[in-house]
Image (cartoon, grey):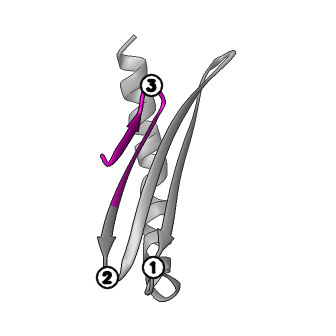
């Protein structure tokens, strides 16, 4: 984790293959629970060429990460 803004935002970032990847996790209270936003930002010299790899992996794993976060939050009640 590279940034934490308690109580509702955290992110991590990494550099690989000439790209800078930032994953943002934001939790916002609603009248019925919590709205979760997960996002990935890819920048850098090779992002136009290799960013599709990050996009493909993200489309696969972000739903699983959201489900795991939901399960953990509900377990903590």
At 47% from the left edge and 81% from the top edge, which residue is drawn? Answer: 47
Q: In this view, does 18 lie to the left or right of 53?
A: left
Name, please, the residue furthest toward the right.
31
Q: How far apart are marks 3 and 2 (CA)?
A: 32 Å
Picture disc at residue 44: 1
The rendered magenta stretch, by its main secondary structure, is classed as strand
Q: Is residue 33 above or below residue 57?
A: above
Query: What span is in magenta?
Result: 1-13
- 47 or 74: nearer the viewer: 47
Give the labeled residue for mark 2. 17
Q: How far apart are marks 1 and 3 (CA)?
A: 30 Å
Circle 1 sits in a helix, a strand or a loop, which is it?
A: loop
Circle 3 sits in a helix, a strand or a loop, which is it?
A: loop
Q: How crowded is mark 3: few (under 14 residues within 10 Å), some or many (20 or more)?
A: few
Q: In this view, does 11 lie above or below 72?
A: below
Residue 8 location, x and y as percent?
48, 29
Q: Is residue 46 above or below residue 70?
A: below
Which label sits in the foreground, 1 or 2? Answer: 1
Give the labeled residue for mark 3. 7
Circle 2 sits in a helix, a strand or a loop, which is it?
A: loop
Which comes sooner in the sequence, label 1 or label 3?
3
Q: Is residue 77 left or right of residue 38?
A: left
Which comes sooner in the sequence, label 1 or label 2?
2
Q: Residues within 10 Å of mark 1 (few under 14, many from 20)?
A: some
Magenta span has 61? no
Residue 36 location, x and y as percent?
55, 36
At 41% from the left edge and 66% from the top edge, which residue is drawn? Answer: 21
């Amino acid at each position: 984790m590279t940034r934490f803004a308690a109580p509702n935002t955290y992110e991590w970032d990494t550099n690989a293959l000439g790209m800078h990847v930032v994953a943002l996790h934001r939790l916002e209270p609603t009248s019925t629970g919590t709205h979760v936003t997960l996002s990935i930002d890819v920048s850098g010299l090779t992002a136009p060429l290799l960013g599709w790899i990050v996009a493909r992996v993200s489309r696969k794993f972000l739903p699983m990460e959201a489900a795991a976060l939901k399960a953990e939050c509900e377990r903590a009640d």
